[in-house]
Image (cartoon, coloured by chain):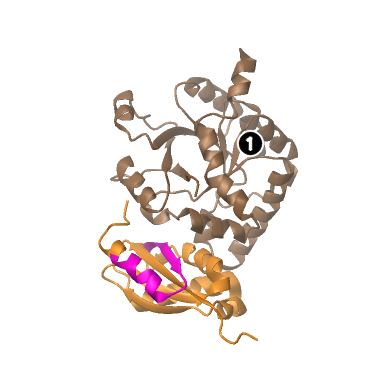
């Protein structure tokens, strides 16, 4: 029996009218996932905000690997944080933190921006 | 991955088409299609020439009367690359899909899917399939609503999707984009579409092949030859 479930790390970028702080973002993500999938669905997702830089709007979320699509839908349903219009773009999904780290640096440097 | 296109983009004052295209590209779209309200000034030929080839423009006709719709279709046909009709009432939906000049029917059940399901409009769906008219699936109400309202919207989308599959009508996924904060990346759109029962392949088609086909008039060519 496999005791340790696989995880996925989601690198995301927040695009907002104003600056979004970590606490507000965390609440918005949890509200969205509770609203869409209920308590059991939210608990299955094993969601955790690993880090978030409010200056650049870039952060990393961890979730169970089976629920990546659910988390994507929940992130897409976030339209405002603390009254400021917001969109969240998933940049990369990886199985390791190391996998998102390199991409994160490139997003910060603007290399992945259109 | 295929090239994704975003339809139903409207520019708010202060935002240029190029800025919107840049934002859409950042989200993973290859091109956008901007709808202009029919009474608003159409982009002049000079502006059109300066537009990036990934920016497509169309006209959205909003009216409550069928004769008015016919008059506007005559007026805009062959003058604008894309004609979109804002539906809602059954008579307007029917009049729009009966006319081969229309490319897309938007909001066939109202802007928040409040006018029920398409099960009472089977004939309309058959005409849409025959005339190659896509029906827009606006996911914006799914994003903006919460609780029982969203449950009602998802149920209606699910029912409508069954009918769309049965009658082979082309769905088009959009988010009623007014600003960059309404943009959602293609993979997020696919995840949102899965909430109402849309398969991954169907959602990819509704974001890539169907919009590309509408822009190149793939389903209209035969009809034009037939007309001649």
Which one is nearer the viewer's eye here, B113 or B67?
B113
Please give the name of the residue rendered at 62% of the width and 22% of the height, measured from the top-left corner. B222
The magenta stretch is A84-105
Q: Quadrant of residue B42?
A: top left
Would residue B12 be visible to someone looking at this image?
Answer: no
Vertical order, A1 against B211 (above or below): below
Instruction: Give chain A's shade.
Output: orange
Name the side, left or right, on which B133 lies relative to B84: right
Pinpoint residue A103: horizontal percent, then vertical percent.
34, 65
Which one is nearer the viewer's eye here, A28 or B188?
B188
Pinpoint residue A23: horizontal percent, then vertical percent.
37, 79
What residue is disc 1 on?
B93
Label 1 marks which chain's residue?
A: B
Queried whether the magenta region covers residue A99, the answer comes back as: yes
Among the chains pictured, the one given brown colouring is B
Would residue A32 be visible to someone looking at this image?
Answer: yes
Queried whether the magenta region covers residue A87, the answer comes back as: yes
| Furthest residue in direction top, as rendered | B228
């Amino acid at each position: 029996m496999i005791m340790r479930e696989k995880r996925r790390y989601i690198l995301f970028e927040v695009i907002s009218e104003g600056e979004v702080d970590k606490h507000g973002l965390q609440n918005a993500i949890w509200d969205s996932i509770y609203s869409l999938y209920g308590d059991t669905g939210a608990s299955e997702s094993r969601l955790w905000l690993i880090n978030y830089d409010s200056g650049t709007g870039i952060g990393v979320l961890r979730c169970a690997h089976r629920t990546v699509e659910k988390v994507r839908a929940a992130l897409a349903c976030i339209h405002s944080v603390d009254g400021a219009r917001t969109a969240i773009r998933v940049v990369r999904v990886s199985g390791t933190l190391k996998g998102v780290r390199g991409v994160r640096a490139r997003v910060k440097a603007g290399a992945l921006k259109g | 991955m295929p090239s994704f296109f975003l339809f139903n983009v409207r520019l708010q004052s202060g935002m240029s088409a190029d800025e919107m295209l840049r934002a859409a590209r950042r989200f993973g779209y290859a091109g956008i299609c901007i709808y202009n309200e029919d009474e608003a000034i159409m982009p002049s030929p000079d502006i059109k020439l300066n537009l990036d080839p990934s920016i497509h423009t169309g006209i959205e006709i909003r009216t409550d009367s069928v004769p008015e719709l016919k008059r506007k279709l005559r007026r805009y046909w062959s003058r604008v690359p894309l004609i979109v009709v804002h539906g809602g009432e059954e008579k307007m939906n029917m009049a729009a899909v009966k006319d081969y000049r229309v490319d897309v029917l938007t909001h066939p059940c109202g802007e928040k899917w409040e006018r029920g399901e398409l099960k009472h409009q089977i004939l309309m769906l058959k005409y849409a399939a025959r005339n190659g008219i896509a029906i827009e699936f606006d996911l914006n109400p799914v994003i903006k609503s919460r609780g029982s309202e969203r449950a009602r919207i998802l149920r209606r989308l699910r029912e409508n999707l069954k009918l769309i599959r049965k009658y082979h009508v082309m769905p088009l996924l959009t988010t009623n984009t007014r600003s960059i904060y309404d943009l959602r990346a293609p993979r997020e759109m696919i995840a949102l579409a899965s909430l109402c029962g849309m398969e991954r392949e169907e959602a990819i088609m509704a974001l890539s092949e169907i919009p590309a086909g509408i822009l190149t008039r793939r389903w209209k060519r035969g009809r034009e030859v037939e007309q001649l």
